[in-house]
């Protein structure tokens, strides 16, 4: 038995509002002026083009109702499959498909003779007059005359209405003397006429009247794809809950999934069959998956009405809606009922409450480890602690140590977890690994430590030794993704393989376009999936790609892209706009265009603002990769591949960081798989030499300034090591000094013609120049200032020459971004001054 519940945990009756109060609350909401009158009736009928509950086929002017799983009716659905198999596009199919007439009435019209009785035939007359017309036509045929229907109509008299159909759930008028509509009368005959109803000339008789009324009570309304929902026969609370849920789903403000009313009708029929007082009492064992999802969503909407934020603590869950928080990876709803100990569940609730209040994260990831840790600890204490761990006063350090040992033992031997966590397939128990054990301990430690700092553990009598015994779990570092090797890259770029990828995109949502954008731009998957419609432009005839780097807070960033990708995105824009026109019947406005998703999702996307999900892309990408038989590949490796190719093409870490949108060069190193230093950048900068301030021509470039290969840079760096020695702010090239002899000029490097500056010393000389300017500006008279400026003028010329040489080879920006090679270069000679400790001590004693 599977029962829906409003309260995940055990809830005292005094805390949660009683059912009578719930009905009063819902009645007040439904009768409010803001409630949609379309949804206030017990028999709800919506138009075919309704944004959420629409039922009409997507083919223009088609009168038939759509299937529940697609936007087309059954016939057009079959036609579309044939069209797709022949290589046709979905948009083109919608243009060329012919509309179909309905095979049945959406609602039977009134009889041409009896205005209070529905017609049952295409002739437009009721059951009684249809029999009379058949008899009249038979008489005329036997007499050799042709029956005139219009003349016959003038001779007929109307009959009084027969009331509503006897079936409780049916909202149609009765069309037969037995008191049933034509649909339910045929069903009644088909099911063997329960109760044996018989209508005589003057009375109605039953063989078993109770059996007949039972059949009328349990029979579902007529199944028509006409957007009609009957809530007749439901208990008052269940009926009000469904009405409010429909209104909230349609007018809640956010994009909602399209609910076929046939699914909602199935939920209502189950409530009627089970005589459920509320949706919370509904047994979903016989409810289909889609209908069960609708029922669960309705209960989630009702929680917003029935529970306040503090009520959720008693109910054993917490919902981000009460905090105005929405997560990028799904609903911010956390069921805490798996934590059986009330004190531990309350500590977890307060921890989540504080995080949602103070610093709500973008996703649910920060909450997974604390919730998992508390669930594992709860399951362990339930078995191994006195009184099942429900009395926090009885817990000691030994109980926590036993829990730690148990987690490590399970990770070492691959045993299943104690809690209710499971693998993604939902059947096999989750196996504890070193990584999950570390996450469990970290989650428990985070909750208990924060609770102790807030004073909550002291209030419940939880001993401090129990809290501080939790160690920090050490998670193993994850290996960086490798770039695609040459064979894999060729397979992923082959035209035949790309065509196979496009075939997986049945509804042409842009699967191949997404993959090619990832390869060409190296963006993160989320940055491509969430692209807006106006994501490309030309600046000075250069194709540009505009996107948001939300992970690093860099919005509306632009990079240059190849012409092929630009044209593919242009074609995708046309398809997206065409899809918008088909749905809304007009072109998007200038205000709507920047908000539309370039790759719109099919579900819960009435306005076209929601992009396809990563799951949608990854499932199809994984299917494609498995079919290519090239091993395990993930889309993010395209980013690593592009970073490595940039480096091979001559870019440095600064270029890679800027192009990929990284927050630091350390992250760029992670993508190009380098060490903590960039030897290529350092060698390139040191290969740019100019004459020092003591030379005849300060600033004269001593290197050719031509681009060089990596091998040339390495060879030159080795040559520099042999022919020079480091000096303050540059290199000394005087060979006797290089060979280890004393300097004949007393190390007056800055006035020596043997001293040269390198590109790595530019920042040092900039600061040197600022220092001289500061000293000159502080001079007591202008003559002294002029003297200092003249004294530094050769050095200034050398600095200008160094900047020109760096600019000629395109390394000026990198030299400006490069920090000092040695901190003592900036802090002065005090770093080279040393004193004996004993002498310092003796000095202080004598003071």
Image (cartoon, grey):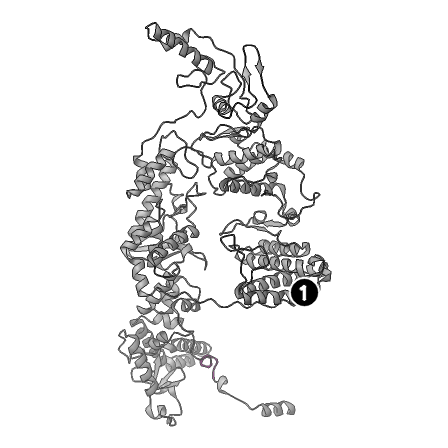
Query: From the viewer's perspective, is 153 left or right of 16?
Result: left
Query: From the viewer's perspective, is 81 left or right of 156?
Result: left
Residue at 58%, 36% in the rendered image: 241
Neighbour tally class for label 1: few under 14, some 14-19, many 20 plus, Cα within 10 Å: some
Between residues 708 and 675, which one lies in front from this camera angle? 675
Quadrant in which the C terminus is drawn: bottom right
Question: Which quadrant of the figure has residue 549?
Answer: bottom left
Residue at 36%, 74% in the rendered image: 681
Query: Residue 1, percent across and down?
Result: 59, 43
* Residue located beneath label 1 in the image: 399
Between residues 319 and 214, which one lies in front from this camera angle? 214
Secondary structure type for disc 1: helix
In the image, is residue 763 above or below residue 100?
below
Please state the extent of the stretch shown in magenta in the rendering: 822-828
Q: Is residue 267 visible?
A: yes
Query: From the viewer's perspective, is 188 left or right of 384?
Result: left
Q: Is residue 753 visible?
A: no
Query: Residue 404, percent across and down?
Result: 62, 66
Query: From the viewer's perspective, is 139 left or right of 447?
Result: left
Query: Residue 267, percent across and down?
Result: 54, 36
Between residues 531 and 824, which one lies in front from this camera angle? 531
Question: Which quadrant of the figure has residue 452?
Answer: bottom right
Q: Residue furthest top?
A: 143
């Amino acid at each position: 038995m599977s029962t829906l519940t409003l309260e995940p945990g055990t809830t005292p009756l005094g805390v949660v509002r009683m059912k009578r109060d719930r009905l009063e609350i819902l009645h007040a909401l439904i009768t409010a002026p803001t409630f949609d009158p379309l949804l206030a009736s017990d028999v709800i009928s919506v138009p075919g083009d309704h944004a959420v509950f629409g039922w009409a086929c997507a083919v223009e002017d088609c009168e038939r109702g759509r299937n529940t799983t697609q936007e087309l009716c059954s016939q057009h659905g079959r036609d579309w499959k044939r069209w797709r198999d022949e290589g046709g596009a979905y948009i083109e199919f919608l243009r060329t498909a012919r509309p179909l007439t309905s095979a049945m009435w959406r609602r039977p019209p009134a009889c041409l003779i009896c205005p209070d009785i529905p017609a049952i035939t295409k002739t437009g007359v009721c059951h009684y007059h249809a029999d009379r017309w058949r008899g009249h036509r038979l008489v005329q045929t036997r007499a050799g005359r042709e029956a005139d229907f219009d003349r016959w109509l003038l001779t007929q008299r109307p009959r009084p209405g027969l009331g509503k159909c006897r079936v409780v759930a049916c909202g149609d008028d009765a069309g037969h003397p037995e008191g049933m509509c034509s649909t339910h009368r045929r069903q009644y005959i088909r099911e063997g006429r329960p109760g044996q109803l018989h209508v005589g000339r003057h009375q109605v008789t039953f063989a078993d009247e109770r059996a007949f009324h039972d059949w009328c009570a349990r029979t579902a309304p007529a199944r028509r794809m006409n957007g009609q929902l009957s809530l007749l026969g439901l208990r008052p609370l269940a009926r009000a809950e469904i009405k409010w849920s429909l209104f909230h789903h349609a007018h809640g403000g956010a994009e909602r999934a399209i609910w076929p009313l046939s699914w909602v009708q199935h939920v209502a029929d189950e409530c009627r069959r089970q005589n459920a007082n509320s949706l919370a009492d509904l047994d979903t064992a016989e409810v289909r998956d889609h209908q069960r999802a609708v029922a669960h969503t309705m209960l989630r909407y009702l929680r917003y009405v029935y529970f306040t934020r503090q009520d959720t603590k008693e109910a054993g869950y917490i919902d981000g809606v009460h905090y105005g928080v929405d997560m990028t990876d799904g609903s911010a709803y956390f069921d805490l009922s798996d934590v059986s100990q009330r004190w531990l569940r309350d500590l977890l609730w307060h921890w989540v409450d504080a995080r949602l209040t103070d610093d709500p994260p973008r996703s649910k990831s920060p909450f997974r480890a604390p919730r998992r840790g508390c669930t594992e600890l709860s399951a362990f204490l339930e078995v191994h602690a006195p009184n099942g761990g429900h009395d926090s006063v009885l817990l000691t350090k030994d109980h926590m140590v036993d829990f730690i040992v148990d987690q490590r033992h399970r990770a070492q031997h691959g045993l299943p977890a104690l809690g209710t966590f499971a693998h993604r397939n939902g059947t096999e128990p989750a196996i504890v690994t070193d990584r999950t054990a570390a996450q469990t301990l970290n989650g428990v430690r985070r909750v208990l430590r924060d609770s102790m700092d807030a004073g909550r553990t002291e209030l419940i009598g939880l001993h401090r030794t129990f809290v501080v015994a939790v160690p920090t779990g050490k998670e193993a570092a994850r290996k960086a993704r490798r770039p695609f090797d040459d064979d894999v890259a060729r397979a992923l770029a082959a035209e035949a393989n790309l065509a196979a990828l496009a075939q997986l995109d049945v509804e042409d949502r842009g699967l191949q376009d997404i993959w090619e954008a990832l390869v060409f731009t190296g963006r993160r998957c989320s940055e491509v999936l969430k692209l807006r419609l106006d994501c490309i432009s030309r600046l000075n005839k250069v194709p540009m790609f505009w996107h948001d780097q939300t992970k690093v807070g860099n919005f509306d960033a632009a990079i240059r892209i190849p012409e092929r990708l630009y044209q593919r995105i242009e074609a995708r824009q046309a398809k997206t706009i065409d899809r918008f026109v088909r749905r809304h019947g007009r072109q998007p406005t200038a205000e709507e265009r920047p908000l539309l998703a370039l790759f719109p999702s099919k579900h819960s996307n009435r306005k076209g603002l929601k992009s396809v999900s990563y799951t949608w892309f990854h499932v199809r990408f994984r299917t494609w990769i498995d079919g290519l038989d090239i091993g395990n590949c993930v889309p993010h490796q395209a980013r690593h591949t592009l970073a490595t190719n940039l480096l091979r093409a001559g870019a440095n870490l600064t270029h890679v960081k800027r192009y990929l949108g990284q927050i630091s060069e350390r992250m760029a190193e992670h993508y190009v798989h380098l060490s903590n230093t960039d030897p290529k950048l350092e060698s390139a900068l040191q290969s740019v030499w100019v004459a020092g301030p003591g030379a005849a021509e300060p600033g004269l470039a001593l290197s050719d300034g031509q681009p060089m290969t990596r091998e040339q840079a390495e060879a030159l760096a080795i040559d520099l090591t042999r022919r020079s020695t480091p000096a303050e702010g540059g290199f000394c090239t005087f060979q006797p000094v290089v060979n280890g002899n004393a300097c004949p000029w007393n190390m007056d490097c800055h006035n020596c013609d043997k001293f040269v500056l390198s590109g790595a010393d530019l920042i040092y000389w900039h600061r040197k120049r600022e220092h001289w300017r500061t000293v000159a500006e502080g001079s007591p008279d202008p003559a002294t200032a002029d003297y200092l400026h003249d004294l530094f003028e050769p050095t200034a010329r050398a600095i200008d020459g160094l900047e020109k040489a760096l600019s000629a080879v395109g390394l000026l920006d990198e030299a400006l971004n490069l920090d000092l090679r040695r901190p003592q270069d900036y802090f002065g000679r005090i770093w080279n001054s040393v004193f004996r400790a004993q002498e310092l001590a003796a000095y202080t004693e004598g003071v």
